[in-house]
């Protein structure tokens, strides 16, 4: 359901900001869980990682898991960082934000999904 812009700014946006604030806490907790899981995984040496990369050693389950967990941690940290920045600024002053193609693609995808 589309809402007028003024109603969005005064009524809807504060509710969304509260929801997103709670989700930011959840994202930060998820990062901690993934980091704790990583601590339990045996780590190969840097030399072993280099040899796996070159194909001189087979990939181990532990090394693969470390990499997957690290990718998840980085992705969640990036989302949390972006969200934290936007929450600090209240998603305001968007006229000064420099958007890249990925931002416009995301807007377009959201409009398409919601239509």
Image (spheres, rainbow, N blue to C red):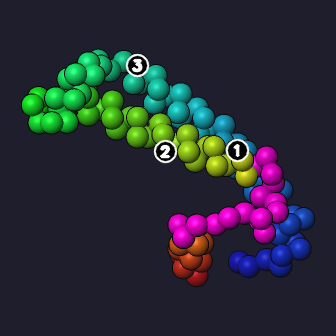
Magenta run includes residue 101: yes
Compute the Cα span from label 2 to label 3: 18 Å
Residue 39, numbered circle: 3
Instruction: Say if 114 sits above or below 61 in the image.
Output: below
Q: Earlier in the sequence, mark 2 or mark 1?
A: 2
Compute the Cα span from label 3 to label 1: 26 Å
Instruction: Say if 91 sits above or below 31 in the image.
Output: below
Which residue occupies 79% across, 77% down? 3
Compute the Cα span from label 2 to label 1: 14 Å
Give the residue at the far bottom of this rendering. 115
Residue 75, numbered circle: 2
Q: Quadrant of residue 61?
A: top left
Q: Earlier in the sequence, mark 2 or mark 3?
A: 3
- The quarter of the image holding the N terminus is bottom right
Q: Earlier in the sequence, mark 3 or mark 1?
A: 3
Instruction: Say if 107 sits above or below 44 in the image.
Output: below
Residue 37, numbered circle: none
User: Between 47 and 76, which is closer to the camera in this rendering?
Assistant: 47
User: Between 20 and 75, which is closer to the camera in this rendering?
Assistant: 75
Q: Position of residue 53 (x, y in %)?
A: 20, 36
Q: Which residue is mark 1?
A: 84
Q: Quadrant of residue 38?
A: top left
Residue stretch rendered in magenta on the structure: 87-103
């Amino acid at each position: 359901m589309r809402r007028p812009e003024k109603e969005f700014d005064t009524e809807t946006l504060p509710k969304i900001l509260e929801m997103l604030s709670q989700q930011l806490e959840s994202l930060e907790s998820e990062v901690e869980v993934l980091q704790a899981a990583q601590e339990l995984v045996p780590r190969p040496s840097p030399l072993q990682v280099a040899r796996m990369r070159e194909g001189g050693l087979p990939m181990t389950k532990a090394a693969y898991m470390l990499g997957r967990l690290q990718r998840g941690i980085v992705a969640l940290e990036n989302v949390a960082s972006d969200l934290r920045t936007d929450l600090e600024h209240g998603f305001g002053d968007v006229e000064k934000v420099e958007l890249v193609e990925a931002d416009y693609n995301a807007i377009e995808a959201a409009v398409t999904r919601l239509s």
